[in-house]
Amino acid sequence: MKLFNFTIIRSKQYKGIVKGVFLNQDKNTTVLYLPNLIDLYKINSIFSMHLVSSTFIFGIIRQIRALKFLNQNQDYLIICSGSGSFSIYKFNLNTGWIRISNHFLGRSGCRRMTPGYYLECDLIGRICMICSLDKLRYVYILNKNQKNNNISIFPIEVHKSNSLITSLKCLYNGFKNPVFATIELDKKNNNSNTSQNNEISQYIVFYEFDLGLGLLVTSYIDKIPLYFNTIIPLINNIAIRPACLVLSSSYITMKTKYQIESSVNFPSRIGCLNKGIFSGYTYFIQNKNNNILYYIQNSIGDIFVVQIIHKQLWQFSMSIEYIDTTNPALDFLMISSDTFFALSENNNFHYIYKLQNTNREKKISISKNFSTINYSNIFLPCFFIHKNFCNLSIINKIEILANVSSLTIKKFENDTMSQEIYLTSSAGLNSFLHILEYGIGVLEIATANLPSEPISIWSIHSYYNIKNKFLIAISFETHTYSAFFRFDEKNSSIFEESHKTGLQESINTIYCNILNETSIIQVFKEGIFWISKQNIISRWNIPRESEIIMATSNFSQLFVVLKNTWIMYFEHDTNDNLYLTSSHHLGKNIIDINIITLFEKHVKSQEILVCTESNILILSIHQNNLFRIIINYKLPTIPYRSKCLNIKKGFIDIFVSIKSGLLLNLSVELYKYIIKTPKMRFIGNSSPNLTISKYGYKNILVIFSDKTFILHFNENRTYYKPLVYKNLKYASTLQISGLTILCGITRKSFNLLILQELDNIFRRTKIALVTSSLSTSLLKYFSKILILSSENYNGVLGKNIGEIDNNKKNYRYKYLQQSRIQVVDTKKKIIYKTFNYPNQETLVSLKLINFYIRRSAFLLFVMLTRAVSKNNGFLYLVYCTSKNFSWIPLHRSFLNFKPYCIEVFKNRVIIGGTDKIVLFRIGRKKILKHCEFSLYFLIPSKIILHSNRIVISDFLEGLIVTEYNINLDAMIVVGYSVYGRSLNNIQFLDYDTVLGTDYFGNILIFRIPQLITFKSLLDPRKYQDLNHSYINKSDPIHVECSFFIGENITGISKYRFFEWKEEIIIYFTNLGSIGILIPIKTKFEKVFFRNLFYHLTLGSNNFLSLSNFKFRSSNYISSRIIDGDFCSKILEFNKSTQLKIARAIRIKITSMTKIFEDLLFKIM
């Protein structure tokens, strides 16, 4: 078995944000980073973020900062990672991030003594300071060579014992010596006659680095209380710099090098009694017209603005004002003078806010500077009433999928486009149920029923001087419906405006369009109508004993095909005249005709595409070579429809659909007219219909078959994606206000749809949950989902928090755990019911048993609970009715052990607990204990079964494979694996293959040898039962495949994007990444990926910024799984680099891209 790992959606649960000029002379660039990934974004004028580069790094990022040099147009990036190194990078558009310099600080890993937890750079790029949590500190002197742009670094050790750093910031000091401010915890030993006491004190320290002597000197130190935790550097151009703000939960204090202090208290929110709830602060600085404001947000989302007013020398005042309340952010970034980016941690979006009211009236409570007595709380408190989004507005938001806790996949049904995926994201009150469907989403804005089945539809832009107005014409067998519609941008709605279109509605329309933005043409069997803006109708009749069967047009050209294989060529001028330019007898039955458009719509085309029963023809319509055949391509079968569009530079793509459900793609090179790389794709069982549309600046192809597909081209790849909507018979498209609108028809309905983002792989629907979730279960016959959830609450028993005596510590903690089952209706997208459980029990797992009685579906729930404070649990049998979904408890059994997992098969229930596995039988109204098997040191995390084979994942020992013998009524161990400890997910791929994931981010595939199966069937007593040691007598099971993802995998399952596609393995991580494992079957693909992987890994390729060593786990060696993210980076290199690699592995460049496209097309 060989697999290909590929990440289809990367996580956006970023851990930090850095702004700088990383692209040459482009100020609006931002770096967002994960623990092992760096994403470079560019922010445009409308504040939308465009991904420029995404790069993995070696190790785990601990700190990252931007390095700015004087008189330089581009900034550098400094990274401290878990590899124990300090690196400086520069971005290049051709090769990505290039490492300029590197220095190793210590051992790898995130250790307390390894520097890298704190990193700060001088504002003009002279030095940087790197610190560990304890003792070790380094100062690096940076020197940039102007000739070769190299950076030389000189490390200086400035260690300090008995000191723990909790915060580090670089203070603004102009061109003087750099100054760093730290908050440190110093531990001093005070010896007395009777005992030895340890006193912990906290200090704020200013360190000044003397550039002349190369020494780090303490310029200021002051003792502060322990509840100060945040430093904000002051950038005001005042005489008292360097200075900073130090924040606590009660007030703000300004510290300066010259021992000048000032404090101001934080206003308190009315209704919030606890003052110590603020665990930390985030901030950003606004500099608008040399007026500097400091915006500070506490941990519950309140935003305050602090302003420092400099009156005279050594005299200044400080004020604070409440601004707004938003979602708590992990970090802020100022984008422009009044726009900032908020990086969320536990929310489902990253936001871009704009300050609306910059000239605020000071009616909200303002606290000015005051004096304190030894940092006491003796001051006049100020209060405010919090308001959401009173001074802020959301400009843009980036949706994220994070904290994924459970996964359930729905099987294929007749009315579904693809398998639906149900995910739950657990984040307290921000918990959601996400329903993912593969494909492009649409927004339905209008729908109407039709009296009979329509034949075709056309949507036409109205005259150029009328905004957002368009014409829709629907053709039936005997008549035509037409009306003018107008689109409302504010409400995204469409309303019917007028039926006076000028079209003849008593005839069957074959084709309809607008010419020169002045005349609407209507083609029918006997002739052509064209209607001017003044509703003047003109007519052209065809010769007798003939009729029109099809037509096509562009801006000013019209082609009509007659029944006797004649092609009529018309041209329309600006005076609203339609002239018959030429005619041509082809001599073959014409199936479809299209105009090839290469340039702007106002330029006349020079070629047309004609599809006959056996050939594809490209004819010239140039005046000198009118209807001359340029290309004649023989088709393998009779076509159905054809379209052509220009989606690649230098090529025309011709698409021909066949009645059997196939789609033929021909790439024609421009000016040479050579057909290259014909491809055949299966689309559906019915005959595909085609139409061309615009999405932004892209040309897309819409394919109508059993499902509606959209073909678009992006980043040198062709994507076929389904439309997540019911089957459309045909649709016409148009662009209004930057939106692509599909005007579609079904059997007896008319629908207007807005096409959403093409880059999205899944259409996502969210349902808000009450609490965070543990697992999900899908009810097959009820269209509902059961969600198990539980939340823990820690409190203090007492009358008031202030009454707690900290010295005696005579208070008690109260531990509560609330469990509930939430029933979600997937059709109505609401929470249907909620069932709560007592505080003394917590839900562990739930299993469903579906059965029928007289063609009615019924449910039995087998629920496993565990006592909170005791090592026992309960087993419930609950009956559920289908009418009101009411619960009827049938039986409750006491368990004298601590249960962990449950599994149900036939009428038996298997429960895994501490040191034992217990089997129960389900009777008519009771659950009876059947037998019990003991296994020493057993802590099962999950039990799965396939036929009579039962696999148990032991949290401490690994994987245990057993078989249940019904005749002997015993469980027999047939195999074990010492690999696979700490597994959180296991499932069967087939009878002899088990897939598992652990908490460290490893994917393991176990293969059970067939000899074990044969031996157990022939001689079951040869193997020991669970009462004895299974390691000595059972056969070992080895790992077939292993791979390190790097993130905790919370859900994994088998999946198909379509019914006719190959089956793959899809997995979801807690950070929101979605990846797939594709089976590699052909020998050619195995050899190609193996050679490419080894060449990129072992070859001396300094252009490769992606490090493969990141994918090595500390527990398992990656084997038999190809790193697809690593190998696919070759498609992003320039052609010279690709040619170098292609020659090394002896393959063509075009063959490499074709292999990647074909591999993804097999499954998507």
Image (cartoon, rainbow, N blue to C red):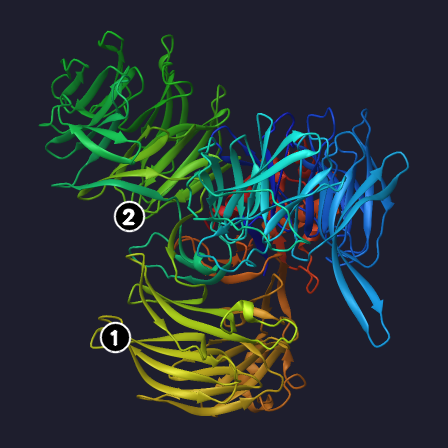
According to the image, label 2 marks what residue? Answer: 726
Residue 881 has which mark?
1
Residue 275 seen in render = yes
Q: Quadrant of residue 773?
A: bottom left
Residue 1095 seen in render = no
Which amino acid type corresponds to the residue marked 1 in the rendered image? Thr
The local secondary structure at tag 1 comes to loop
The local secondary structure at tag 2 comes to loop
422 is higher (above) or lower (below) than 943: above
406 is higher (above) or lower (below) than 130: below
Q: Residue at x 62, y 56 (%)?
A: 1046
Direction from residue 872 to residue 222 in the image, left or right: right
Direction from residue 461 to residue 1135 in the image, left or right: right
Q: Residue 1038, how many percent across, how many down?
A: 64, 71
826 is higher (above) or lower (below) than 37: below
- Disc 2/disc 1 C-alpha distance (Å): 31 Å
419 is higher (above) or lower (below) than 40: below
Q: Residue 219, how many percent across, how many down?
A: 82, 42
Q: Residue 463, how many percent across, how many down?
A: 25, 18
Disc 2: CA contacts within 10 A as few (<14), some (14-19) or many (>=20): few
Which amino acid type corresponds to the residue marked 2 in the rendered image? Lys
Instruction: Give the residue at the far right of this rendering.
Output: 213
Instruction: Give the residue at the far left of this rendering.
Output: 506
In primary-sequence order, the first of circles 2 and 1 is 2
